[in-house]
Every structure is written in structure tokens, then in C-alpha cells.
Image (tube, helix red, strand yellow):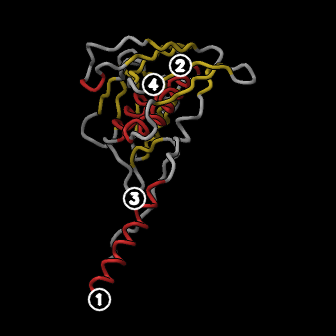
Amino acid sequence: MLRSSMRRVHSSFIHNTRSFNTSAVVASHIGRTPVTVASNVTVHHDLTPIQHPRIPSELNNTTLTVKGPLGELSMPIKPFVQLTMDKSVQGDDLVKIAIQDQTNKKQKSMWGTTRNLIRNMITGVSEGYQVHLRLVGVGYRAVLENDKRSVSLKLGYSHPIVIDLPQGVTCTVPIPNRMILHGIDLQQVTELAAKIQRWRKPEPYNQKGIFINDETIKKKEGKKK
């Protein structure tokens, strides 16, 4: 009798637990927000499937091209992502992003991601991006070389570190221990900043190293004898 009552309790618990999974599908709050297009930017979506991709995941993707006063960027768009051009109440151009199946986990994950990438492209070709680097340390300094296409860093090693700037990224050195990277591709600019920082990551004991933008590090006390 005890076993039968335990079975009834267990079955009712499972039944009640399953009822929690019947909630309605929630759309991506980021993905469903339209992207405003600046007046000096044009957006073109080529629906021709990519047949010769750079990487296998781009096969049958479409291509989005964004042009602005600072340059041009393009990005592959997944086949299940739908882009439509619209107008706001104020008359601004908008890009609306949708997906075919809101219940599909993979499609939902790409919804907000695609929206943010498109926004970054529009900002890049219209305003550009800057990343500031601070060289904190005795004798740390940066010098532009090779017609400003490479930067030579003195970071306490026995030899200078020379880093070539990729196409589309420029660098200025307002003072010897400050660098500013400029570019229209946010990912490209931040990746280069991270590459430079790897040569001297900030350390907490003397608080020296290469700091990106307003980055700080909490000071640690050394071991006391």
C-alpha cells in the first residue's frame, strides 16, 4: 500500500513538472529591435547564396553590404535570417531582423547576434571605432615605423616588439606611452588591441602592463617576510 501511494505521488509530481514547459515562446528582445541606418549609409542585401565560401559554415549564406563615408563592410547572413528595410515615424531608414522559426534554439541565438553585428557595421562605416592603449611601465614606449604601417614597442624585453597593422586599421601615438587604434571593423580593431596586450598583460603587484581603454587592475600586496 505504501509503494502504491508513493507511485501516485511520483506520477503527480511528474505531471505537474511537465506543465511548466508549456509557456509561450519569447522572442529575442535584442533581435526584434530595428537598427537605425544613418542618412549617409547605404545597406544592400544580396540574396544570392554563397557557393564558394571562405569557411564551410558560410555555404548558402547570403551577403549583407554596408557602405558609408569611412568605407565598406560585408557580412554573411544565415539563410534563416530575414532582413527587411522600413521607415520609422521620424522618416529614418530601419533594418528589421526576423528568423523563420522562433522555437528553434540555433535560430534564436543568431537573431540578436546578427542584429548587433549589423549595428556595429553601420556605426563603423559612419563613425568608426577607436581603442586606446596605455603602456604603463618604466621605459615602455611605442614608435610608428614603416610609413606608419607598423608599430615598434619597447616593453622591457631585450629587443623591440614590431607589430604590423592589418589593412583597414591605423594607429596614432599622441605621446610615447599612449596608442590609439582606428578602424571601421570593431572585431578587427579589438582583436589587434588584444594581440598587442598579450605582450605585457597587466599584473597586479606593480600595476604595470598594457591597459585597454579605461581598464584597471586591483593592486595586490606582495608576500611579506
Q: State which quadrant residue 9 falls in.
A: bottom left
Mark 4 → mark 2, Cα distance in angstroms: 8 Å
Mark 1 → mark 4, Cα distance in angstroms: 68 Å
The residue positioned 26% from the left and 13% from the top of the image is 52
Inspect the image, locate mark 2, and give the three-letter code of the amino acid beneath it.
Val
Mark 2 → mark 1, Cα distance in angstroms: 72 Å
153 or 198: which is nearer to us? Answer: 198
- Dot 1: what SS? helix
**Taking 156 as reference, is 1 above or below it?**
below
Q: Which mark is residue 185?
A: 4
Q: Position of residue 201 (x, y in %)?
A: 35, 47
Q: Which mark is residue 204?
A: 3
Inspect the image, locate mark 4, and give the three-letter code of the amino acid beneath it.
Asp
Of callouts 4 and 2, which one flags the residue occurring earlier in the amino acid sequence?
A: 2
Q: Position of residue 17 (x, y in %)?
A: 41, 65
The residue positioned 40% from the left and 68% from the top of the image is 221
10 Å crowding of disc 2: few (<14), some (14-19), many (20+): many
- Dot 2: what SS? helix
Inspect the image, locate mark 3, and give the three-letter code of the amino acid beneath it.
Pro
Q: Disc 2 marks which residue? A: 125
